[in-house]
């Protein structure tokens, strides 16, 4: 009888520990109720001039015109 009570208490403590461990810090305060057409996230930070220039340079090297084929075909 005493073993059953100890086992029940241990089980309850284990369940509480599992429930508390499941609450990860990065999931706290996240948006759980959404509104269609409304962005509820944090405001974006303003990019510096250097960051904007770096993004322009990176974008310039992507996509765009293709080179003519080489080899005469």
Image: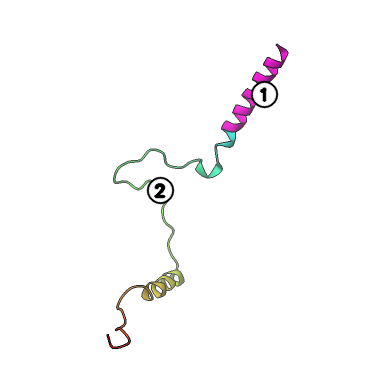
Q: Residues within 10 Å of mark 1 (few under 14, many from 20)?
A: few
Percent across and percent down for residue 29 are 48, 41
Image point 67% across, 20% down: which residue? 7
What quarter of the picture does the C terminus occupy? bottom left
Percent across and percent down for residue 38 are 32, 46
Image point 60% across, 27% down: which residue? 15
Q: Looking at the image, is mark 2 or mark 1 earlier in the sequence?
A: 1
Q: Is residue 47 above or below residue 63?
A: above
Percent across and percent down for residue 26 are 53, 45
Percent across and percent down for residue 24 are 55, 41
* Residue 26, label in figure: none
Question: Dividing the picture into quarters, in which one does residue 35 lie?
Answer: top left
Q: Which residue is mark 1?
A: 10
Q: Nearer the viewer, mark 2 or mark 1?
A: 1
Image point 43% across, 64% down: which residue? 47
The mark total stands at 2
Determine the residue located farthest toward the top in the rendered image: 1
Query: Taking 22 as reference, is 72 left or right?
Result: left
Secondary structure mostly seen in magenta is: helix
> Is residue 64 located in the magenta-colored stretch of the structure?
no
Image point 57% across, 31% down: which residue? 19
Q: Secondary structure at mark 1?
A: helix
Which segment did they paint magenta?
1-19
Q: Is residue 31 above or below residue 10?
A: below
What quarter of the picture does the N terminus occupy? top right
Q: Secondary structure at mark 2?
A: loop
Q: Which residue is mark 2?
A: 41
Determine the residue located farthest toward the left in the rendered image: 73
Query: Along the line of sight, which residue is nearer the eye, 32 or 7?
Result: 7
Q: Is residue 12 above or below residue 55?
A: above
Determine the residue located farthest toward the bottom in the rendered image: 72
């Amino acid at each position: 009888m005493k073993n059953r009570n100890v086992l029940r208490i241990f089980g309850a403590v284990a369940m509480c520990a599992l429930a508390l461990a499941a609450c990860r810090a990065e999931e706290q305060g996240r948006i759980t109720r959404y509104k269609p057409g409304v962005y509820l996230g944090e405001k974006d930070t303003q990019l510096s001039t250097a960051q904007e220039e770096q993004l322009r340079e990176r974008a310039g090297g992507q996509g765009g015109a293709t080179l003519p084929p080489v080899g005469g075909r």
